[in-house]
Image (spheres, grey):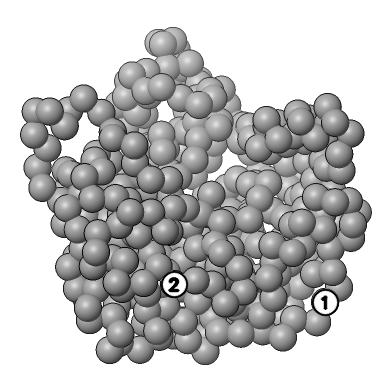
């Protein structure tokens, strides 16, 4: 994102100012900007894991429970829920041994269901394309497990949410293009978790294409050319709602394959398996999204029904690993990226079909 922004500026191409994109990639700076605009209840607090006074300062400025995380993290990596001072001390100690992409900071823990707003903005006006559900693992981890689109918000609440998103994106100077805004729906209203200046990852883009009945990537191309995307004004024909379940193994180890894919054709929702790892890839981390080996995708008339179909199909699938050998401890062996839906998966995975989108390939980013 940042390299692309710098190249856009260097060659005078249409696009957001690099400073805006740098801001969106700094979660602490976004929190502070939203606080200044009256759009969140608290500022971020920088955390120095090597300073003995940090714990007391964070309790005083942020309070407990709190979230400790990387300003430039992704995929739920390097995120700690701290509910008391003991957990805070343990998280700070653990963070001191991690290689972060940005800086360590703390913010309040906003309790409530988590969603992702899928938006398109042009000339400072934001259109809410829909909302994705984000079902997570139990506390204290935040492993993403199930996503469905579009969530059926009542129209008045959806309209209010669109107005709020317009203000949120305007506050960070985000005037054009897609965004994937994660938020928690608290008793006091929505609270931003993070702003991603792109279409969502995994199969969010695929779900957008199918559920809206249009190829949303056409709008991405139009925006890159400096033209108002037709999607800003289009009447959307609509299509099936979608849901997907991330397939994690039960134990870390070397990925050896997937059982149960032969059952998918006989299950409702037209479920399909999208592989994202290759046979022999190491699976070292099961606490965040680095650990899933593939995605079970399904469709139905509503996001709720699609979720039921996807979960039923995922329950029939088992991701297999075998324990690491001593030779495997040297590190990853070229793992496929999370968007590699057509990589060299095992024969069973390929046969089950990393299906080709009827409207556009998922972003996987």
Front-most of 97 and 46?
97
Question: For mark 2, does the 10 Å Cα neighbourhood hold few (<14), some (14 to 19), or many (20 or more) residues?
Answer: some
Q: Position of residue 229 (x, y in %)?
A: 84, 63
Q: Residue at x 80, y 50 (%)?
A: 224
Q: Position of residue 50 (x, y in %)?
A: 41, 11
Element marked by disc 1: loop
Q: Tell me if residue 34 comes above or below residue 206 in the rendering.
A: above
Lateral position of residue 153 relative to residue 343, left or right: right
Q: Position of residue 88 (x, y in %)?
A: 36, 29
Which quarter of the rendering shows the N terminus? top right
Q: Residue at x 83, y 27 (%)?
A: 10
Front-most of 55 and 34?
34
Element marked by disc 2: loop
Q: Tell me if residue 230 comes above or below residue 174 in the rendering.
A: below
Which of label 1 and label 2 is nearer to you? 2
Residue, disc 2 = 355
Residue, disc 1 = 234
> Is label 1 in contact with label 2 (beta carbons under 8 Å)?
no
Q: Residue at x 12, y 37 (%)?
A: 324
């Amino acid at each position: 994102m940042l390299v692309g922004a710098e190249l856009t500026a260097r060659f005078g191409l249409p696009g957001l100012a690099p400073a805006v994109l740098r801001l969106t990639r700094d979660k602490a700076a976004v929190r502070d900007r939203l606080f200044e605009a009256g759009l969140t209840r608290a500022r971020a607090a920088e955390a120095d894991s090597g300073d003995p006074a940090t714990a007391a300062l964070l309790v005083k400025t942020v309070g407990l429970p709190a979230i400790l995380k990387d300003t430039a993290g992704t995929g739920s990596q390097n995120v700690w829920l701290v509910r008391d001072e003991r957990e805070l001390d343990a998280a700070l100690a653990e963070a001191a041994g991690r290689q972060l992409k940005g800086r360590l900071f703390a913010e309040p823990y906003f309790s409530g269901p988590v969603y992702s707003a899928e938006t398109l903005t042009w000339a400072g006006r934001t259109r809410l394309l829909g909302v994705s559900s984000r079902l997570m693992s139990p506390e204290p981890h935040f492993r993403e497990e199930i996503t469905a689109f579009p969530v059926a918000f009542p129209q008045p609440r959806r309209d209010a949410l669109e107005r709020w998103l317009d203000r949120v994106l305007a506050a960070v100077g985000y005037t054009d293009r897609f965004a994937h805004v994660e938020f928690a729906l608290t008793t006091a209203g929505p609270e931003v978790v993070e702003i991603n200046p792109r279409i969502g990852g995994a199969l969010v883009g695929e779900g957008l294409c199918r559920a809206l009945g249009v190829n949303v990537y056409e709008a991405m191309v139009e925006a890159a050319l400096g033209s108002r995307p037709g999607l800003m004004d289009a009447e959307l024909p609509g299509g099936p709602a979608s849901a997907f379940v991330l397939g994690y193994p039960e134990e870390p180890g070397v990925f050896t394959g997937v059982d149960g894919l032969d059952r998918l054709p006989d299950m409702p929702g037209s479920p399909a398996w999208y592989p994202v790892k290759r046979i022999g890839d190491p699976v070292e981390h099961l606490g965040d999204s680095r650990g899933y080996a593939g995605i079970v995708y399904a469709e139905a008339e509503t996001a709720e029904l699609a979720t039921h179909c996807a979960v039923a199909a995922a329950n029939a699938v088992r991701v297999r690993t075998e324990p690491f050998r001593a030779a495997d401890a040297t590190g990853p062996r070229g793992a496929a990226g999370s968007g590699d839906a057509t990589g060299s998966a095992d024969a069973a995975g390929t046969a089950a079909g990393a299906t080709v989108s009827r409207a556009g390939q998922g972003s996987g980013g």
